[in-house]
Image (cartoon, grey):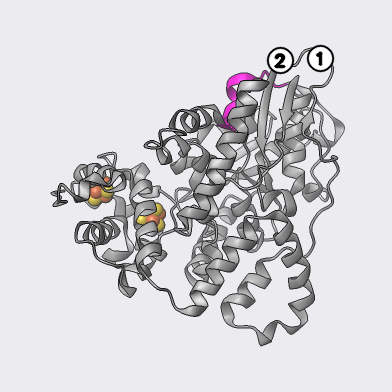
């Protein structure tokens, strides 16, 4: 794609890297074929190629974002299916991030829109705030009809209750039965995940400890920052990124870390991008790059580093039919697809890919809250495809997808790490109690 940035504009590091990406695009439109919003809405501007043109136009012409541009950019899920399809290696993720940041700087959203986005930015990235809102929404449920539609949808998406934790809060979870741990890893416990599904972190910690690995949960690290990053709120996101980088890098230097484990693929994708985000920051670039290099999804880490010790128990004697939902951030963002499937196969169960598995379930961070109508259609399609495989339960590696899919079906859904923990000596997951 021809570009027309001036020399002055290219002094800006973000323009410079976006220009390189635009130049890779050959307008072929292959990406439209696998874009969920293009498939649903059939408008060129709701596909990746159209959005690339919109972003290029804003940046090259120093134009403030218009209502029309914002509408089409906001409808993008950041699912990165287009990146998997693109034959030219266009890094759409970095373009849409740049576009969103430009919108945030140049466009004044209507009051209600601003209010909702600020509310989500403040509430979801802080687990204490999220817990308080959870209690308030439960109290508000009987009066739900008084609220505007998008607030009603948010209230409905809130879990009915938060599960109780079974592991105490600790900074270091020591390896079991080893004088010296075989490895030492940091775990990102996640801002929303640790409140609505603490069993995922608990299964991860138990599993790693049981295999001789010490797990560090660093004080001061809550959110990975991706929530604000995807809302275009770069100042807030960068504040979180910086804090995380410094805390983990310090831990790495002082006590040693073999890996930083993410068990939420949406967060893992962002951690792996810290190096790019701080590429021009002289103080942080080396540290950020190191944090990205250390980051691994839990499935990747298990596959590469651990000889899993599977245990036969009476309760897991049956052979289950399991549908594997490949989260977009996992398959498109981190290019991990077969690894979790192969890990589950080792438990002796049958695992199925879901038809049209490359398409998003509609969760996409805060998307199901901000673009509820599109998210609902995507969920409906996803559930119908899941049901075609007639599974006894569903598994995936991302809390957002778990919450979204659980809202559309009664088939139980759980994180892949809960299955691996169960089959290597952990308890049977609560969600499978009736199976
Ligand atoms: S990220 Fe997903 S929704 Fe956005 S343009 Fe690419 S394929 Fe379409
Ligand atoms: S598939 Fe890649 S090269 Fe083709 S239009 Fe889409 S982004 Fe551009």
In the image, what residue occupies the spot 50% across and 27% down?
A: 290
Q: Secondary structure at mark 2?
A: loop
Q: Are marks 1 and 2 in contact (CB under 8 Å)?
A: yes
Q: Residues within 10 Å of mark 1 (few under 14, many from 20)?
A: some
- The residue most toward the front is 283
Residue 178's mark? 1
Q: Is residue 360 visible?
A: no
Which of the two residues, 356 or 376, is positioned nearer the viewer here?
376
With 319 as the anchor, is 166 left or right in this view? right
In the image, what residue occupies the spot 58% across and 41% down?
A: 243
- Report the image quarter containing ligand 1: bottom left
- In the image, residue 328 lies at what x, y percent? 49, 47
Q: Which residue is mark 2?
A: 182
Which of the two residues, 15 or 124, is positioned nearer the viewer here?
15
- The residue most toward the top is 179
Q: Main secondary structure of the magenta part?
A: helix
- In the image, residue 387 lies at what x, y percent? 59, 56
Q: Secondary structure at mark 1?
A: loop
Is 145 placed above or below 47 here?
Answer: below
- Quick check: is 121 in the magenta stretch? no
Disc 1 to disc 2, how far (Cα)? 8 Å
- In the image, residue 301 lies at what x, y percent? 60, 26
With 302 as the anchor, is 358 left or right in this view? left
Magenta part of the chain: 296-308
């Amino acid at each position: 794609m021809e570009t027309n940035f001036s020399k002055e504009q290219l002094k800006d590091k973000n323009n410079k890297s976006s220009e390189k990406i635009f130049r890779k695009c050959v307008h072929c439109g292959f990406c439209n074929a696998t874009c969920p919003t293009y498939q649903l809405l059939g408008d060129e501007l709701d596909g990746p190629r159209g959005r690339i043109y919109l972003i290029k136009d804003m940046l090259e012409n120093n134009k403030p974002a218009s209502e029309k541009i914002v509408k089409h950019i906001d409808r993008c899920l950041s699912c990165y299916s287009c990146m998997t399809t693109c034959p030219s290696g266009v890094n759409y993720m970095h373009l849409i991030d740049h576009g969103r940041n430009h919108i945030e700087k140049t466009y004044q959203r209507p009051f209600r829109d601003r209010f909702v986005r600020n509310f989500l930015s403040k509430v979801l990235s802080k687990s204490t705030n999220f817990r308080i809102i959870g209690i308030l929404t439960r109290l508000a449920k009987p009066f739900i009809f008084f609220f505007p539609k998008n607030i009603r949808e948010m209230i409905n998406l809130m879990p009915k209750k938060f599960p109780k934790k079974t592991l105490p809060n600790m900074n270091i979870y020591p390896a079991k039965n080893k004088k010296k741990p075989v490895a030492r890893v940091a775990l990102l416990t996640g801002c929303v995940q640790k409140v609505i599904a603490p069993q995922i972190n608990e299964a991860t910690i138990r599993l790693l400890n049981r295999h001789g690995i010490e797990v560090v949960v660093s004080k001061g690290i809550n959110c990975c920052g991706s929530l604000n990053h995807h809302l275009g709120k770069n100042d807030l996101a960068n504040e979180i990124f910086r804090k995380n980088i410094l805390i983990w890098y310090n831990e790495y230097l002082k006590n040693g870390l073999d890996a930083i484990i993410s068990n939420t693929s949406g967060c893992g994708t962002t951690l792996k991008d810290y190096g790019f985000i701080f590429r021009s920051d002289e103080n942080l670039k080396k540290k950020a790059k190191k944090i990205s290099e250390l980051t691994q999804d839990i499935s990747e880490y298990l596959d590469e580093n651990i000889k899993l010790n599977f245990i036969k128990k009476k309760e897991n004697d049956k052979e289950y039919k399991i549908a594997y939902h490949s989260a977009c951030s996992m398959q498109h963002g981190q290019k991990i697809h077969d690894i979790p499937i192969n890990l589950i196969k080792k438990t002796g169960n049958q695992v199925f890919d879901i038809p049209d598995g490359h398409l998003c379930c509609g969760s996409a961070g805060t998307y199901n809250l901000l673009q509820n109508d599109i998210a609902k259609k995507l969920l409906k399609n996803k559930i119908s495809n899941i049901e075609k495989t007639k599974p006894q339960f569903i598994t995936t590696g991302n809390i957002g997808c778990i919450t979204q899919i659980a809202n559309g079906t009664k088939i139980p859904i759980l994180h892949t790490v809960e299955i691996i923990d169960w089959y290597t000596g952990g308890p049977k997951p609560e969600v499978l109690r009736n199976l």
